[in-house]
Image (spheres, rainbow, N blue to C red):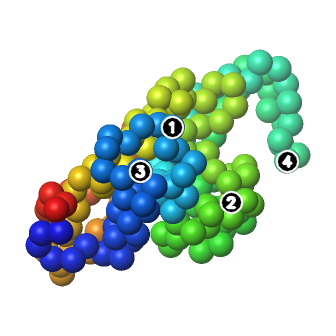
C-alpha cells in the first residue's frame, strides 16, 4: 500500500476481502462471507442516520401506544435517530462499536431501523443495502482511505436544520492499493 499505513480497521476489512474474495470484482453473492465488514456497515448505518425520522404516516384507526391514545387520522412519525441511539437498546450508543453486530442479539434488535420500519419502510431498502455493500467492498478492495491531516478527527456530526443528515465536510486521501 502506498503512503501512510491505514488504520487497523481498514487493514482488517482489506484482509477479510482479500482472503474471502481475492482481487476479482466483488458480487453481492459474497454477502454473508465478510462478517467484520458487514457488521461495520451496519454500525455506520446505526450511527449516521440519513434522516432523523420516517416520512409522516396517518393512523388508519384509533390505537394506543404505551398508554397514549392515538386517534384515527393522526400524523405519526417514527424517530429513527432516537431508536438507533437509545441507551435502553444499545450499550454505549454514542460509541462506534462494529463488533456489536457480530452478536445475534444486535442483529435482531428492533431498535435498529436505519431505513425505517413497518409496511411503509424505505421502498429502496433492498437496493440501498446491495449498493452500500457493493460500493464499500469494491472500493476497499482497490483503495485505502486516509485522513488528509492525521491531526483532524472525523466525526459523525452533521449539518443541522435539514430534512436529511449531511455529514460535516472533511478531506480524505484515496490511495490505490498495490
Q: Which residue is mark 3?
A: 21
* Mark 3 crowd level (few <14, some 14–19, many ≥20, 10 Å Cα): some
Q: Nearer the viewer, residue 163 or 72?
A: 163
Residue behind mark 4 = 66
Q: What is the spatial separation of the Cα atoms under label 2 and label 4, in whole angstroms?
A: 23 Å
Label 3: which secondary element? helix
* Callout 2–callout 1 Cβ contact below 8 Å: no
Q: Judge the density around disc 2: few (<14), some (14-19), many (≥20) Cα neighbours within 10 Å.
A: some
The residue that mark 2 highlights is 106
Q: Which residue is mark 1?
A: 29
Residue at 85%, 25% in the rendered image: 62
Image spot of residue 176 (x, y percent): 15, 57
Q: Are the residues flagged by discs 4 and 1 in contact, CB closer than 8 Å? A: no
Q: CA distance from mark 2 to mark 3?
A: 26 Å
Which of discs 2 and 4 lies nearer the camera? The answer is: 2
| Residue 130 in sight from this viewpoint | yes
Query: Which circle's residue, 2 or 3, is located before the other in the chain?
Result: 3
Gap in angstroms between the C-alphas marked 3 and 1: 10 Å
Amino acid at each position: 500500500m502506498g503512503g501512510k499505513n491505514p488504520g487497523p480497521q481498514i487493514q482488517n476489512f482489506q484482509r477479510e476481502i482479500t482472503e474471502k474474495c481475492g482481487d476479482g470484482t466483488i458480487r453481492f453473492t459474497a454477502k454473508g462471507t465478510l462478517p467484520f465488514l458487514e457488521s461495520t456497515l451496519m454500525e455506520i448505518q446505526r450511527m449516521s442516520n440519513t434522516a432523523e425520522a420516517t416520512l409522516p404516516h396517518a393512523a388508519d384507526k384509533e390505537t394506543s401506544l404505551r398508554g397514549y391514545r392515538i386517534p384515527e387520522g393522526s400524523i405519526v412519525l417514527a424517530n429513527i435517530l432516537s431508536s438507533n441511539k437509545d441507551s435502553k437498546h444499545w450499550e454505549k450508543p454514542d460509541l462506534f462499536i462494529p463488533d456489536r453486530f457480530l452478536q445475534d442479539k444486535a442483529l435482531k434488535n428492533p431498535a435498529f431501523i436505519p431505513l425505517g420500519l413497518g409496511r411503509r419502510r424505505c421502498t429502496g431498502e433492498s437496493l440501498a443495502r446491495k449498493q452500500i455493500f457493493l460500493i464499500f467492498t469494491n472500493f476497499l478492495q482497490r483503495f485505502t482511505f486516509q485522513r488528509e491531516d492525521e491531526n483532524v478527527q472525523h466525526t459523525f456530526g452533521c449539518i443541522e436544520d435539514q430534512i436529511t443528515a449531511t455529514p460535516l465536510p472533511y478531506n480524505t486521501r484515496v490511495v490505490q492499493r498495490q
